[in-house]
Amino acid sequence: MSELQMRVSDEDRERTARRLQHAFAEGRLNQLELEDRLELALSAKTYGDLLGLISDLPQEQPPVSDVVELEAKNGHLKRSGDWAVPRRLRVTSKHGSVDLDLSEAVIDHQVVEIELNLTYGSARITLPEGGVANVDGFRSDWGHATSSVPSRPRPGAVHVVISGRSKYGGVTVRYPRKRWFTH
């Protein structure tokens, strides 16, 4: 099944609707075009249906590279907040730790592959609520792979596939910590 034939979520429909409303505000669509496209967007079943509604509009931001390589020899490697997650992320760290927080990141695809090459450090990966992760492809000589999130793919949830190797470190996958004293 191609990506265009995959079914969309309510969030995908709403994101497309926001993009159409933005195009209307810029004067790229008239009122009638906006109404017609919004009706189709909110009833879309597949990614192909949504793509057809916005293919003639300029892209909001440059596309995320399919593969991004991050490397650190001695320091701490961290990504958090609002960042664009590529389809494949290759992370190499010789002596430092790795902290990848995907909980607030922009993830435009269903599956994210993270390949870890750690020598003496460990990695912590924080998923958005509802996300799933498979750590079966990660090996460690003297460490561990710990996951407190489900591993089977779920419809509409981001699926992170973790592979790679560590000599003396491990990997931990979890959801964001709950904050008890917030209003």
Image (cartoon, helix red, strand yellow):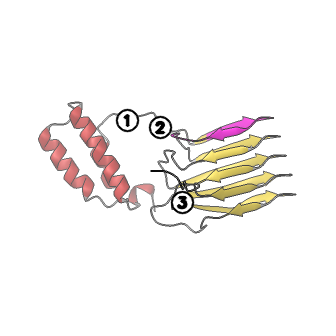
Q: Amino acid at mark 2?
A: Pro
Q: Is residue 123 above or below residue 24?
A: below
Q: Which residue, given by chain and number where applicable, does mark 2 sit on?
A: 63
Q: Which residues are magenta?
A: 68-83
Q: Which residue, given by chain and number where applicable, does mark 3 sit on?
A: 131
| Extreme residue toward the top, this view | 26
Measuring from the top left, give residue 122's x and y in whole percent.
77, 49
**Residue under the point 70% across and 57% down:** 172
Question: Along the horizontal axis of the image, is 40 left or right of 147?
Answer: left
Question: Along the horizontal axis of the image, is 121 left or right of 28?
Answer: right
User: In whole angstroms, how far apart are the C-alphas of marks 3 and 1?
Assistant: 26 Å
**Residue under the point 37% across and 59% down:** 9
Q: How many marks?
A: 3
Measuring from the top left, give residue 110's x and y in whole percent.
50, 56
Q: Amino acid at mark 3?
A: Gly
Q: Is residue 166 at all visible to an observer of this figure?
A: yes
